[in-house]
Image (cartoon, rainbow, N blue to C red):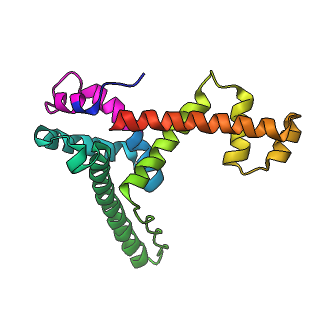
């Protein structure tokens, strides 16, 4: 079931004490976790997310949701999250540099950590995060046949040829293609639902 539109919820949570605040957190946290896992895997996600929600407490009272003029809220939220993650990463790298200097002074210099991957467009990052959430939901959906999930994993995720998958399941190539097509259709539905939920 898809929650109420972001417009109503965002209006409610302008007050950080509003009873719908936990609903707001539960709604957006999965997308935030997926984004950080994809873009900043070395960071402690919980800390960055808490800082982002804390920042929102001060921002939302004056925030006006106008997707036509200002874009989707998810992109606005991702921008705040990205900035918090970058700051955390800078702080982490600074601590690493200090440690490296100390180790070098003691004759134990270590190789500096590799820099974090470059940040891509927020919309692309959101879509990747939404797909990851949709994929987890699809694979845990008990209404989807286990064989369909396994066919999808092997052909779409692992890159196995449809012919080899068909042979292992004693199916025709056409049947494998159909199963994969059904899985992709369901994933597209889930992503569309997430886009509706996250605004």
Q: In this view, does 24 lie to the left or right of 129?
A: left
The residue that appears at 79% across and 50% down in the rendered structure is 161
Q: Is residue 71 left or right of residue 151?
A: left
Residue 21 colored in magenta in the image: yes
Question: Which quadrant would the C terminus be assigned to in this image?
Answer: top left
Q: How many marks?
A: 0
In which image quadrant can residue 146 be found?
top right
Vertical comparison of 60 with 3: above or below: below
Residue 13 colored in magenta in the image: yes
Residue toward you, 43 or 166: 166
Residue toward you, 113 or 39: 39
Question: Which quadrant would the N terminus be assigned to in this image?
Answer: top left
Magenta part of the chain: 8-30
- Secondary structure mainly formed by the magenta segment: helix
The residue that appears at 44% across and 68% down in the rendered structure is 115
Vertical comparison of 178 with 55: above or below: above
Residue toward you, 134 or 42: 134
In which image quadrant can residue 95 be found?
bottom left
Q: Is residue 37 visible?
A: yes
Vertical comparison of 11 with 41: above or below: above
View extreme (left): residue: 62
Residue toward you, 106 or 33: 33
Q: Can residue 42 be seen in this view?
A: no
Q: Residue 124, how many percent across, how many down? A: 43, 54
In which image quadrant can residue 62 be found?
top left
Vertical comparison of 125 with 13: above or below: below
Q: Residue 104, how many percent across, how many down? A: 42, 77
The residue that appears at 15% across and 41% down in the rendered structure is 64
Q: In this view, does 29 lie to the left or right of 165?
A: left
Q: Residue 141, how many percent across, how many down? A: 59, 26
């Amino acid at each position: 079931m898809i929650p109420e539109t972001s417009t109503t919820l965002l209006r409610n949570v302008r007050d950080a004490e509003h009873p719908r605040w936990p609903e707001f957190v539960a709604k957006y946290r999965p997308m935030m976790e997926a984004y950080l896992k994809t873009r900043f895997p070395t960071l402690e996600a919980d800390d960055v997310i808490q800082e982002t929600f804390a920042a929102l407490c001060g921002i939302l009272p004056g925030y006006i949701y106008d997707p036509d003029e200002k874009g989707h809220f998810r992109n606005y939220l991702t921008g705040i999250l990205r900035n918090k993650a970058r700051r955390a990463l800078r702080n982490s790298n600074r601590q690493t540099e200090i440690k490296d200097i100390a180790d070098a002074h003691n004759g134990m210099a270590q190789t500096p950590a590799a820099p974090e991957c470059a940040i891509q467009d927020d919309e692309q990052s959101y879509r990747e995060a939404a797909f990851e959430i949709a994929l987890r939901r699809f694979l845990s959906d008990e209404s989807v046949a286990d064989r369909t999930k396994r066919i999808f994993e092997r052909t779409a995720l692992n890159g196995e040829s449809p012919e080899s998958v068909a042979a292992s399941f004693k199916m025709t190539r056409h049947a494998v293609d159909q199963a994969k097509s059904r899985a992709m259709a369901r994933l597209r539905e889930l992503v569309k639902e997430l886009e509706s939920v996250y605004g």
